[in-house]
Amino acid sequence: MILLILLMLPLLAAAACGAWRGDPRPLARGSAAGAGAGFILALILSRQVVKEGVVGFGRGDFLRADGLSAILVLIVTLVGWISLWNGEGALRRARDRQELSDVHLRRYYLLTNLFLFTMLLSVTANSVGVMWVAVEATTITTAFLIGLENSPEALEASWKYILIGSVGIALAFVGTVLGYFDFVQRVGEMPHALNWSVLAGVADRLNGDVLRIAFVFILVGYGTKAGIAPMHTWLPDAHSEAPAPTSSMMSGSLLVVALYAILRWKVVVDACVGTAFSDRMLIATGTVSVAVAAILMIRQVSYKRMLAYSSVEHVGLICVGAGFGSLGTLAALLHMVGHAAGKSMLFLLSGNIKEAYGSTRIVMVRGLLRSRPLTGALFLAGTLALLGLPPFSLFVSEVMIFRAGFLGGHPAVTGLLMLLTLAIFVFFLGYVNRILYGQPPAELPAARSPRAAEMLPMAVNLAVLLAAGIVVPAPFLSLLRLAAGVIHP
């Protein structure tokens, strides 16, 4: 029942938000409390998965969670909880400045809870068909969130996201249909034919050529949602215009949900044709993503777009890690968690910076450590974590990825990746130095600093980044190994 309750929490919260017509403040608190309860359930689910291996619910295990699903459920619920908790104050102040109305806020909490529901359904549905529908539904909910402010720039970014995301999800549908029809031709009609567990069990009887073609469609299709280059072009526009809590959830959890769909299909393809094909595809696309991020990082004018291109880099590193074999897969999963904690924190802080300076342009922001000391200190800590410096978890995961590359016989690719990440390190840190230091502008917008209670969620982000960077807790390490074993048995 834990899987059903986990899904019902955001769905019931969305229904309550849709029916509410009064002051939106109770919706904010209720949504944050529901997301927090979801994170507690995710912890319980993870413990149960470590103990039992697989947890299922419904006929034919309609809902199913193994180690990989449990990792994603933890990420989605954690980022959702932190974003809703921290974002309440910023959205309330936007209403006070008459930038958002009560209608906008009620719509925001309705769509955000639906967004959480669709992501949780994506990573717990056993059927790859239901998974496809749920991932498509994330496009619908987030498109309206991106355009929440109704500015011309936000509406343009929303439409761009819809168009590019729809093309991507259509390609993923083609790959899903190819896999299903090959199953019917080779195995015949049977109940729950679209269930991932069924497909993986009979993969050795499927047509390898058809599955290779299907995986290309799936990689490009879901890769569009994940922000893999060159299908990433929607990502910087969407993140620059979306409210900070929405950017936090999209970068911290939505991108890895799309990667989850790719990894699920990778297991089926590997069981049929071996790991070499999918590994090469992931390494190639991941390396291209890191290279594109490095090139685009050279000249940035917006700190939110800078963070968006950083997501392209980290998604690329996760893909490469998954293609480097067992050690690389373990590192990629750890990188998912570290990126979710670090990037969600930085996007939430970017909302504070925009509120304080009235602009997302790097040239307009100076002396953040003087004007907003707590925001500046946390932004510096998040930057160091995101750039892969010790003692944060992304340092450990990046070292593991590079080590897996050298041990796996990919020295040229690994060396190139190290050079590209170094270039990103230099440019990213240079922009952040301009933001943090110097003299603040003489006249700043009259914006109230966030209360300490609003900044408290950042302690959770830092705790995750440090705990997984210094000594990975034994239960979490067991879950990571279990998840890596799903992808590379």
Image (cartoon, rainbow, N blue to C red):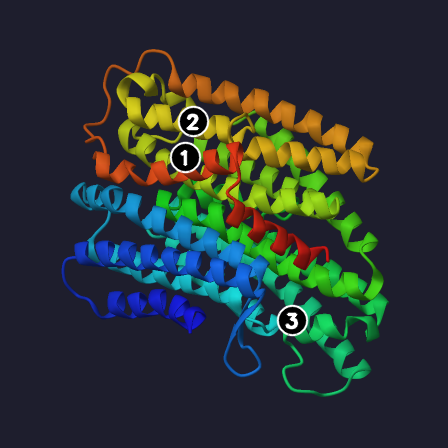
Q: CA distance from mark 3 to mark 2?
A: 40 Å
- Residue at the spot 31% in from the left edge and 70% down from the top edge: 12
The residue mark sitting in front, 3 or 1, is 1
Q: Earlier in the sequence, mark 1 or mark 2?
A: 2
- Amino acid on which disc 3 is placed: Trp
Against 407, residue 145 (above or below) is below
Tag 1: amino acid: Leu
Q: Amino acid at mark 2?
A: Ala
Q: Quadrant of the N terminus?
A: bottom left
Residue underneath mark 1: 462
Q: Is residue 83 among the parts visible in the rendering?
A: yes
Under circle 1, the secondary element is helix
Q: 22 or 205, which lies in front?
A: 205
Residue contact at pointers 1 and 2, CB within 8 angstroms: yes
Task: Find disc 3 in the rendering and name its residue.
Answer: 196
Residue 408: x, y in percent?
81, 40
Task: Please name whichever residue, 100 or 327, is drawn nearer the observer in this view of the structure.
Answer: 327
Q: Residue 217, which numbered label? A: none
Where residue 388 appears, as percent x and y from the top left, is 56, 29
Residue occupying image coordinates x 25% and y 14% = 442
Q: Element at badge 3?
A: helix
Which residue is denoted by mark 2 in the rendering? 381
Residue 414: image location, x then y, percent: 75, 32
**In front of the other: label 1 or label 2?**
1
Q: Quadrant of residue 348?
A: top left
Q: Is residue 151 left or right of residue 319?
A: left
Q: CA distance from mark 1 to mark 2?
A: 8 Å
Placement of the C terminus among the 4 image quadrants = bottom right
- Crowd around label 3: few <14 · some 14–19 · many ≥20 (10 Å): many
